Image: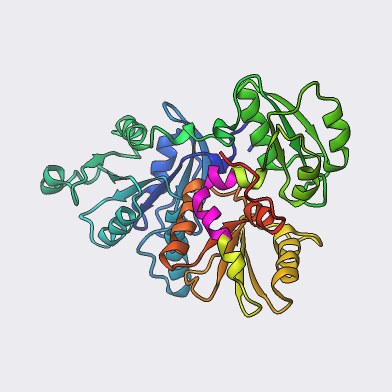
Amino acid sequence: MGLQDTPRANRPHIALLGKRNAGKSSLLNALTGQAKALVSSVPGTTADPVYQPFELRGVGPVVFLDTAGLDDDQGELGALRVEKTRQAMDKTDLALLVLTQAPREELDWLRQLQKKNIPTLLVWNKTDETPVPADLAREGVQGLSLVPVSAKTGQGIDALRQEIIRLLPDTFWERSITGDLTAPGDLVLLVMPQDIQAPKGRLILPQVQTIRELLDKKCSVLSCTADTLSQTLACCAAPPKLIITDSQVFPTVWAQKPPESLLTSFSILFAGYKGDIEAFWEGAKAIDQLTPQSHVLVAEACAHAPTEEDIGREKIPRLLRKRIGEELSFTFVRGNDFPQDLTPYDLVIHCGACMFNRRHVLHRIAQAQSQQVPICNYGIVLAHLTGILDKVCHA
C-alpha cells in the first residue's frame, strides 16, 4: 500500500467464500481485471485468507478476501484453513458465497453469515460449464437469488459489480473520527507521542487519519509533543476548540489545557470510530470492581514485538496493579488471536484497533457482551485511572 492509499482497515471488506475449486480466485481476478490471485485447477490452492486492496468502480477503495475452501478436508491442516476462513467472517462487510452446484455445506455457512447480519450475495460461477439449475434460478436459496457469472468468459461480472454496489452499506464512508466535536474553522491541537512506539521519521496511523479528516473538515490543525505543550498553547491567539492527546499523557495535558478547550484522546476517538463507545464507557465501570484475584485480558490489534514501555503490556498493567494489587493477573493477545471463551476474564481491555476494520471490533464487543464480560479500551481505561473520564469528551 502506497502513501496515497486508503488504509486497509478503513475499506469495506468483501469476502469470497465457497468450496475448493469453486473458482473464487478466478472470480477475484475477473472482478478486479487483474491477475491478483493465484489460480490453479488443484483444489486447496488458497490457504490463509489473502487480502487484496482494490479500487472498485462505483464503490471506491475496498478489500477483497480470497479464502480457503469451506470443504477443505486435508486433515489437521485442512481444518486449520477452514477455521481461518471462519475467522475471516468476523471482518467481512459483504460476503460473496460462490456456488458451482446445489448448496449443501454452504447452507451452514449461509446461516452463520445471516446470524452475524452480514449482507450476502450468492454467486453461481462457471455458467459457461454448468447453467444455474432451473429450481435454483426460480426459487433461489433461503430467499436469496443467485447472480450467474463466468469468471472465465467475463459473463455476468458487470452485473455482479452492480449487486456489490447495491448491497454495501450506503453509510460506510459517513463515519467520522471527530464527529460533531469539530466544525469548519475550528483550531484543533494534537498532542502526539514521539516515543519508542512511534517509529522515528513516521507518524502512527491514528494521527495520520485524524489529521486528514480535520483538514477535509476545513479545520486548522496544530501539532506538538507533550513536552512542548505550554509553548504551543502560548502561540495560540485563542484557545483550541479541541485538544486530542495521546492517552498516556492525559494528566499532563489536563493540567495545562485552557478551560475553554475540549479534551479527548486518539484512542477514545477510535473507540467510537471503530467500535461501540458506549459499550467501552460502560466497561470502564468494571475497573472499580476488580480484586487482586481478578484476571484481565489485554487485546492488541497490532502484531508488533512488545517494547519496554508498551502501553498494553507494561503501562496499563502497572497502573492497575498499583490500584488493585500486585496479584492482579493478565493475559495478552495480539493480532487475530482472541479467545472464543472470555468467561475466565473479569475485564477485556482492547487497543484503539486502528489496524482492524469496524466489523471486526464490533464482533469482539458482541462476543464479550454475549458472555457478560465487560470490555473497555486503552484510552478510556487510562482516563478512568487518572480520574478524568467524566471530563473528557467523545464523538
Residue 290, image x and y in percent? 61, 72
Tell me which residue sits at (73%, 60%) in the image. Answer: 305
Q: Quadrant of the C terminus?
A: top right
Residue 187 visible within the image: yes
Q: Is residue 49 magenta?
A: no
Residue 303, image x and y in percent? 66, 58
Asked whether 10 or 371 is in front, the reply is: 371
> How many marks overall?
0
- Relative side of 78 to 136, left or right: right
Where is 349 relative to 242, above or below?
below
Tell me which residue sits at (42%, 70%) in the image. Answer: 74
Residue 45 visible within the image: no
Q: Which colour style is shown?
A: rainbow
Tell me which residue sits at (73%, 58%) in the image. Answer: 311
Q: Quadrant of residue 328?
A: bottom right
Asked whether 32 or 26 is in front, the reply is: 32
Q: Quadrant of the N terminus?
A: top right
Where is 108 relative to 344, above or below?
above
Q: Is residue 273 magenta?
A: yes
Residue 307, image x and y in percent? 78, 60
Tell me which residue sits at (48%, 32%) in the image. Answer: 173
Q: Quadrant of residue 149?
A: top left
Residue 158, image x and y in percent? 33, 29
Q: Which residue range is magenta in the image?
A: 270-284
Where is 333 relative to 391, above or below?
below
